Image (cartoon, helix red, strand yellow):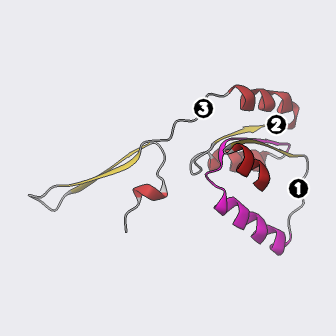
Amino acid sequence: MRSDIETVGKLRLLEEIRSFEGTDPIALWKDAQFDLSHVNDFTHVAVVAEAQWVRTIATAADNFLAAVVKAFELTQLEAARTWLLSAPDHVQPLGMAYQNHADSNVVEITVEGKITAADIGT
């Protein structure tokens, strides 16, 4: 996958999970390292899984990943492929705006879309 990212740039990913029985700690660590280093290299992710809990996690992931994530049942594999091929390009969310009021101790934070690391100051 790394070579595809280097060659093509941002990818659209279809992840088909037919059955899942867990993972060993080393594989989990390596997967997490890859995911964190490539979190912005995917624009759309279709997760196709039989297990409802996997689809629920995928749906929740749409709220905190830059990619658009959509969950499908195993019987919807072709629908997932079609969605990946036809989904419009993802527009980066607006994020968060901060405003302070010089004449008071009131500050305002406005969230519109997804918050990214660029929105969080130090």
Q: Residue furthest left?
A: 103
Question: Residue 89: which numbered mark, if any?
Answer: 3
Q: Residue furthest bottom?
A: 26
Q: Is residue 40 above or below residue 94?
A: below
For mark 2, give the secondary structure.
loop
- Name the quadrant of the C terminus: bottom left
Report whether 102 appears left or right of 6.
Answer: left
Q: Percent x, y for residue 11?
A: 71, 43
For mark 1, give the secondary structure.
loop
Q: Which residues are magenta?
A: 24-50
Say which label, 1 or 2, has the lower sequence index.
1
Say which label, 1 or 3, has the lower sequence index.
1
Q: Is residue 10 above or below residue 116?
A: above
Q: Is residue 24 above or below residue 88?
A: below
Q: CA distance from mark 1 to mark 2?
A: 14 Å
For mark 3, give the secondary structure.
loop
Q: CA distance from mark 2 to mark 3?
A: 23 Å
Q: Nearer the viewer, mark 2 or mark 3?
A: 3
Residue 85 appears in the rendering: yes
